[in-house]
Image (cartoon, rainbow, N blue to C red):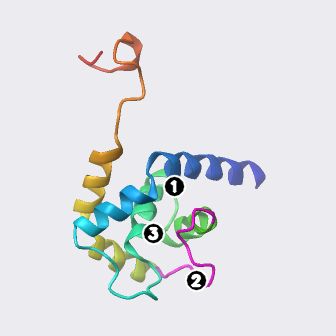
Amino acid sequence: MAGGWLADQVSLGVLASSVPRDVVDEVVAVAGRAAKRSDGKLPPHVMVYFVMAMALFAEEDYEEVAARLAGPLGSWGCWDAGWEVPSSGGITQARQRLGWEVLAEVFARVAVPVADPHARVGFWGRGG
């Protein structure tokens, strides 16, 4: 469905612009989670984007999320066209290797308020 494809592209485009690859690579390196093999299907930088895409497409299974993400990752220079969508078992293992700490640090580096600090309607609770 074209509308679904367009919504996927917009969602993933916002993700890519909000979480730059250089930040992901730096966090992965600092955390000591760099890929052990150069031919791995799911290098750490791919898994960072994959885990975030799981939140965008929470209703989908692992393989569907990977399939939706493969095209945009290729255009971002993060996905080798020769790779195939991995199995759910491979994805689970790659997520375990990555660990939650990498995602927490990526979040800490890129999460910023999008509203003007003085805008009363831009914050919930006591913010603003």
The three-letter code of the residue at mark 2 reads: Glu
Residue segment shown in magenta:
75-87
- What mark, if any, has residue 84 been given in the picture? 2
Quarter occupied by residue 21: bottom left
Q: Quadrant of residue 82?
A: bottom right
Residue 116 lies, in percent from the top left, at: 40, 19
Which numbered disc, 3 or 2, marks the residue closer to the eye? 3
Left or right of 99 on screen, residue 22? right
Q: Nearer the viewer, residue 63 or 113?
A: 113
Q: Estimate the spatial distance between the alpha carbons at disc 2 and disc 1, rounded to whole Å.
A: 20 Å
Q: Quadrant of the N terminus?
A: bottom right
Q: Is tag 3's residue or tag 1's residue first in the polypeptide sequence?
A: 3
In the depicted structure, whether residue 64 falls above or below residue 80: above
Residue type at mark 1? Phe
Looking at the rendered structure, the kind of residue marked 3 is Val
Which residue: 40% across, 82% down?
A: 89
The residue closer to the viewer here, 30 or 39, is 30
User: x%, y% of residue 28?
Assistant: 30, 66
Q: Secondary structure at mark 2?
A: loop
Question: Which secondary structure lies at badge 3?
Answer: helix
- Residue that numbered label 3 is attached to: 46
| Quadrant containing the C terminus in the rendered view | top left
Magenta segment main secondary structure: loop
Image point (61%, 68%), residue name: 74
The image position of residue 16, as x and y in percent, is 51, 52
Residue lying at 52% horizontally and 61% vertically, measured from the top left = 60
